[in-house]
Amino acid sequence: MHEKIIAFILQYVKTKSDWWIKTAFLTREKIRRGLTMDKTLMRKNLGRLTRLWFKTEQKRQIEYLEPKNYKLSNETVQLLDIFSKWVEITRFGSIPFPSFSEKIEIKLLILALENVYQ
């Protein structure tokens, strides 16, 4: 009897989470299509999507930290070795980051980042 109750609770939680995720994505689709939405509904939806993103990112990072992902193949080690030798030969220097003493430098940085984003 105890296992049946636990299975029922887990099934309820799974169904509720599936509904919650589906609702978040359906609301996002309505917003994307430009339908009229309440401002609080939009904020709630953004919060839901943010929590979903954090959950998937956390899951991805946990999977990365598992020991099987730390093993490097010989090709990867050779590639890193070649790259490090190339950096030493070319005397590759760091690219200076702009100082934010001038407003124009901040604006140029924002424009450059927008171009990279697009």
Image (cartoon, rainbow, N blue to C red):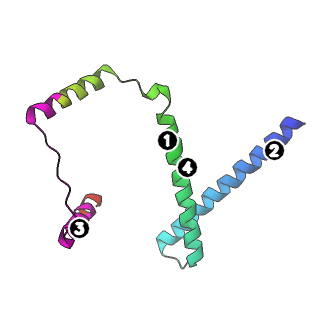
| Nearer-the-camera pick, 35 or 85 | 85
Residue identifier under label 3: 106
Amino acid type indicated by mark 3: Ile
Q: Nearer the viewer, mark 3 or mark 1?
A: 3
* Label 2 packing within 10 angstroms: few (<14), some (14-19), many (20+): few
* Residue at image point 9% right, 35% down: 90
* Label 4 packing within 10 angstroms: few (<14), some (14-19), many (20+): few
Chain-order first, disc 1 or disc 2: 2
Q: Which residue is farthest right?
A: 1
Magenta residues span 85-114
Residue identifier under label 1: 60
Chain-order first, disc 4 or disc 2: 2
Q: Say which element carries label 2.
A: helix
In the displayed structure, 104 sits above or below 96; it is below
Is residue 64 within the magenta segment? no
Chain-order first, disc 3 or disc 4: 4
Residue identifier under label 4: 55
Q: Residue 85 appears at what percent x and percent y? A: 15, 28
Residue 43's disc is none
| Nearer-the-camera pick, 19 or 72 | 72
